[in-house]
Amino acid sequence: MLSELKNIAIADYDYPLPEERIAKFPIEQRDHSKLLCLKGDDISEHHFYDLPDLLPQDTMLVFNDTKVIHARLFFRKETGAVIEVFCLEPHQMPVVQAFEQRERCTWTCFIGNNKKWKSGPLTLEFSILNSQFSIQATRREAVGNAWVVDFEWTGGLSFAEVIEAAGVIPLPPYLNRQAETSDATRYQTVYAHHDGSVAAPTAGLHFTPEVFDNLKSKGIQTEYITLHVGAGTFKPVSTDTIGEHEMHVEPVHVTADNLRHIIAHQGKPLIAVGTTSVRTLESLYWFGVQLQSNPDLDHMHVNQWDPYTVSQGSALRMDESYSNILAWLERHDTDRLDGETQLMIAPGYQYRVINGLVTNFHQPKSTLLLLVSALIGDRWKECYRYALDHGFRFLSYGDSCLFLN
């Protein structure tokens, strides 16, 4: 099975996407975006505020409550050259701990205009409530196509406060525009809570307090887990087959209560909001499978091809797998799991946790499109063709889909 999977041609997951169909800006009201619903053989068109009426009875929606950080820092040299330092992830430190630092911390970063940064530190001045502060960046060694960068700053602020004030929110590269003031709010879900992403979990951008009120009135349960989205989410598959593509690693954070609530919901519809929620939920299953044969693991790391190589997964129910994690948390005297996943979900994958998905329309030749195809098969082509023919808007600021399995 693994060899067949790795030979899947990415050209089969291409489609024509005219530039004018990419939504460069969000619509004025989040929940007035279009919603395509695939249920059985039927494709129907709605507005996003119709979502509560389209969900099956007793549904649980699972959200990714990560928060997009102002990851782009622009330093200007005395020569006038502008160096962009794009914070990707903390270097050898947990995300939460990195944001709590009050004097210095180290991150792995992309560096724009790197050739202009000959040597020495760069300094950026910024203000908070009319008080002036500065942050200094010192470049260290290269790590692949990124760099390790040391930051130091004044004022005793947390790094979370520093980057919020000094940085700019990162927009997807395919928008081909600079961030505007409104993006700081609109490229963020209304339920964003935990700092750490450099890209928004865009399926959640459509939700409003009014939609949540309607979900509650319909008896729809909501659960919040965290996966911090990395820049790799925008990386198209550039190889001929998916077996040659290396998935990016992203940190996940869930609580023991998350696991208990999901176990208690077994047998009823569980629908993920966004592909990042899918990857988190399914990755947890495979970590529970790992613990079945090796309960003494000291860390959660789900590799790209684990589901296609671990045979005992086929015999383990979701509740059994998640219960393995609960037992592991108890042995480690904690109620919070901090791990990471590199999971690739592609056609041939058997979903263990979710029954449906709320998601946006994705880039051609992307791993996100592979994930969708694993859920609904080649119906994705019909759905995307319908969306292109009926004026739907595509990608991060575009419209959305509800796929019910």
Image (cartoon, helix red, strand yellow):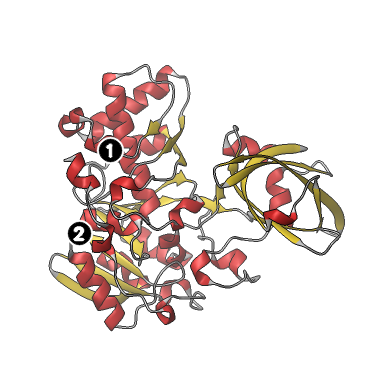
Mark 2 or mark 1: which is in front? Answer: 2
Q: Is residue 21 left or right of residue 74?
A: left
As helix, strand or loop, the secondary structure at mark 2 comes to: helix
As helix, strand or loop, the secondary structure at mark 1 comes to: helix
Between the C-alphas of marks 2 and 1, the distance is 26 Å
Query: How dense is the environment of label 1, judged by Cα within 10 Å: few (below 14), some, or many (20 and up)?
Result: few
The answer to which of 134 and 116 lies nearer the viewer is 116
Mark 2 sits on what residue? Answer: 376
Q: Is residue 333 visible?
A: yes
Task: Tell me residue 56's x, y (percent).
Answer: 22, 59
Q: Is residue 89 left or right of residue 200?
A: right
Residue at the spot 31% in from the left edge and 19% down from the top edge: 294
The three-letter amino acid code for the residue at tag 2 is Ile
Where is residue 216, by image quadrant?
Answer: bottom left
Q: Which mark is residue 264?
A: 1
Task: Tell me residue 121's x, y (percent).
Answer: 80, 46
Please determine whether, in this image, residue 306 is positioned above or below residue 20. above
Q: Is residue 402 left or right of residue 250?
A: left
Task: Tell me residue 283's x, y (percent).
Answer: 34, 39
Where is residue 142, by image quadrant?
Answer: top right
Task: Tell me residue 229's x, y (percent).
Answer: 48, 50
First reached walking from the N terminus: tag 2 or tag 1? 1
- Determine the residue located farthest toward the left in the rendered image: 41
How many numbered discs?
A: 2
Q: Is residue 12 left or right of residue 69?
A: left
The three-letter amino acid code for the residue at tag 1 is Ala
Residue at the spot 24% in from the left edge and 56% down from the top edge: 9
Please determine whether, in this image, residue 230 is positioned above or below residue 24. above
The image quadrant where one finds the C terminus is bottom left
Q: Is residue 164 visible?
A: no
The answer to whether the residue labelled 2 contacts the one labelled 1, judged by CB atoms less than 8 Å apart, is no
